[in-house]
Amino acid sequence: MRSTGSYAHQRCVACAQNISNQKLVQGILDSIPSPEAACLSAEDISPSSNGPRDDDPDDLFAEATEEVSLDSPERQPILSDGPSPAITPVTPVMISPRVDVFDRSPDQDEDEEENRDTFDIQISVSDPEKVGDGMNAYMVYKVTTKTSLSIFSRDEVCVKRRFSDFLGLYSKLASKYMHMGYIVPPAPEKSIVGMTKVKVGKEDLSSVEFVEKRRSALERYLLRTVKHPALLKDPDVLQFLESSELPRAVSTQALSGAGILRMVNKAADAVNKMTIKMNESDAWFEEKQQQFENLDVQLRKLHASVESLVCHRKELSVNTASFAKSAAMLGNSEDHTALSRALSQLAEVEEKIDQLHQDQSYADFYLISELLGDYVRLITAVKGVFDQRMKAWAKWQDAQVMLQRKREAEAKLQYANKPDKLQQATDEIREWEGKVQQGERDFEQISKNIRREVGRFEKDRVKDFRVVIIKYLESLVHTQQQLIKYWEAFLPEAKAIA
Amino acid sequence: MVRSVSVDLNNDASLVIDIPDALCERDKVKFTIHIKTTLSSFQKSEFSVPRQHEDFIWLHDTIVETEEYAGLIIPPAPPKPDFEGPREKMHKLGEGESSMTKEEYAKMKQELEAEYLAVFKKTVQVHEVFLQRLSSHPMFRKDRNFQIFLEYDQDLTVRRKNAKEMFGGFFKNMVKSADEVLISGVKEVDEFFEQEKIFLLDYSSKIKDATAKAEKMTRSHKNVADDYNHISGAMNSIAADNNTAFKKHLEKCAEVFEKLRKLEDRVASDQELKLTELLRYYTRDIQAAKDLLYRRARALADYENSNKTLDKARLKGKDIAQAEENQKQCLRKFDKLSESGKKELTSFKARRVVAFRKNLIEMTELEIKHAKNSMSLLQGSIEILNSN
């Protein structure tokens, strides 16, 4: 069992001033043991993001596709053709491998299910690079996979992928597995506003943060995907991780994760409206569906509160910095020498504290807020899977209805003395009997799959939460320790005023 | 209990004043003033008297209007007690009582009490300091109205009304913005006052700015505390739906956030009390010092005018004696203001330094205390959560 020790995790960071924040984030992310990391795709917090909203119930594709003109396959030749476009690294600053800020939690793999005994894979998404410029530009990320699993051709693989590649992967997996009841982790959301700034070349703090947010979200998405035992073995996943050139999906446009879910859910809704309400014979499903409805509401509320915390903590940082400057000015103006010096030192302490608050807000965000966002979207996927089951049930019921009709038709033909038609009718009965059987089998299969998937989901959810909350509390401890340090250093200065 | 934002002004045992209690009755706040004295001018040696905020303002105004005190820094009037925030909350609490769970109601009530307490502490502190400034000053402590304020065992309302009619707010009606122009316009011969003028004008704007920034910082702390509160509530509602061991875990987490909220609240209110209130107070005190400079500048202007009048009188040969007398008086007044002004401004600096020192030390000690409490809370919780 390879230990989840720290490995070189080199990333370009956009602004030098962000380095300390990045280090903190890096430390946090490194110390989440990757096999256990909750692998979900993040919801982009930017207001233009394509969250599951019902503003256009009729147009199935309304929000599923965006940025078509920029990402459409016609404009982007397959990578092997044509000259490679200019590559602009985001910044030249590299982070060297460093000691994590936080202790690693001990490996928690010991008490795992059998299918995880040999689970050993680490994925990182790093080195965002801008390719091309102007509105045709896009970001390319390095995806590094380290594993001892035999399904992979090498121990370590590095590939370059762009955002739409991730979306393409998700859409393939969703189309293959969702109808079987598998909870396929949704890919991160598109963001027109965020990406436009990056394309246009603004290297300000918000673009940098956006790229980092996205990078982190893509990483979590991949980790969650491979954590799923079936998805890990999927050829599309393997190709995504290993293949140096990924053919662009030519026939389909890249759909956003939420777009696909909405499409799927809408289709299910349409089906439901037409059929009789399902007679739920299985109390487990009824109970679970209700639970997930509740959890959806509650998680969104919790997420909103945490987002508010992130925002206010940032404000606190800004206001503290502002006060620090003001205190420095006051110190300069003060004509009593000792008091003047103390005020200047107070200003310095407050400046350090403002940095502390900013670091904490990053922890608030990356540890808790993003994770909650991931889960909010994952719950949508879970609800989608329940809908798929209803669809399967409806299909089965329809087949039964059809079979009945065919039988009635055959019975009628018995008296009509049309031997050809009778034979056809008999054949059709056999066909539909087969379909009914298949329908029943599919329904039972999807029910079984969902039970297993939900069990796995709930286990992961509990584990993720436990791990993350500890990490978060530890980040708070760190902040308090620093506060004590700073104030204890200032105390003698205050006492020295004479 | 020494609560004063300023230095411990109660170190002269001949007249010791403090405010041990205050009551908030609807719109009015009633302060209980407690006096201990060895002075013979008072009838009793220890007694208490209830006073309203408006009584303090009356006292302040009569002192400002007193010509005799023109050369002194008049202690700034305490600001009106502002219970608007807690009052609003109480209103919300009353309205929403039926729609809240018992726990939510109890929690909100607790928050409300904490907020009341914070406002209470602030306003008591600032009213107390006002009286202590007067009692510790050799001239103010002998003021007749001050004694009435302390001793008169009836309601001062009637007196206050009369005073308003009498004085009509003479000084207050002067346009304050003319202050700075007049002060900076004066051709200063005296090096001391020249330095003070430059210092006070600059310091005044800096401390106003620092006060505003400190207020914003404190408000952000309160917002963070609020968020912890909501997070705690949200976790509890998720916990309620879980029937497993996870439920206990979530409930414990919710509890941690609730405690963090309380601590963050304390950090915010202590910071406000020690830092923001300190800055607020000295912003007002600096203004009082500037007012003194203003009065002196006016006196100088008057003296210069009286010189011109005397010259004119000599030229015309009329009213010379009157003009000479006027000039002598103006000079005397100006000299008196300069002499006492110098003393006042010097002791003001000393007072300011001591107050800053005291409050910065206390603030720092409280920050350390709260951070240590937070840390032990967090570490204890991590241990419990890990062992689950």
Image (cartoon, coloured by chain):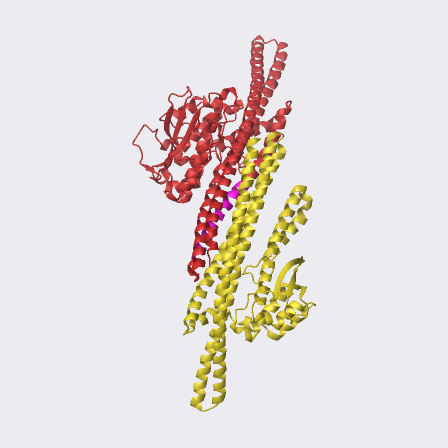
Give the vertical position of B59 relative to A45 (above or below). Answer: below
User: As displayed, is residue B88 above or below residue B138?
Assistant: above
Chain drawn red, letter? A
Q: In the rendering, at what x and y percent does residue B28 appear?
A: 66, 60
The C terminus of chain B lies in quadrant: top right
Which of the two residues, B224 or B120, is positioned nearer the viewer here? B120
Of the chain colours in the picture, the one used for chain B is yellow
Q: Residue furthest bottom?
A: B317
Q: Nearer the viewer, residue A251 or B256?
A: B256
Q: Looking at the picture, tell me which residue is in the foreground, A20 or A68.
A: A20
x, y (%) of residue B183?
A: 45, 71
**Is there any visible trace of residue B178 in the rendered image?**
no
Q: How many marks?
A: 0
Residue in the picture at 45% in, 50% down: A349
Q: Is residue B30 left or right of residue A441?
A: right
Residue A330 in the image, given as x and y percentages of width and height: 44, 58
Decide whether the magenta segment is chiefly helix, strand or loop: helix
Chain part drawn in magenta? A305-329
Please say if B370 is above or below B55.
above
B345 vs B336: above or below: above
Q: For this view, does A160 lie left or right of residue B14? A: left
Given residues A392 and B172, the one toward you in this image is B172
From the top left corner, tell me how far across and down residue A259 is, in percent.
49, 33
Instruction: Locate the N terminus of chain B and report the quarter of the image it occupies.
Output: bottom right
Residue B96 left/right relative to B375: right
Tell me if residue A382 is in the magenta stretch: no
**In the rendered image, is residue A141 in sight?**
yes
Report whether A434 appears left or right of A74.
Answer: right
Looking at the image, which residue sits at the far left? A83
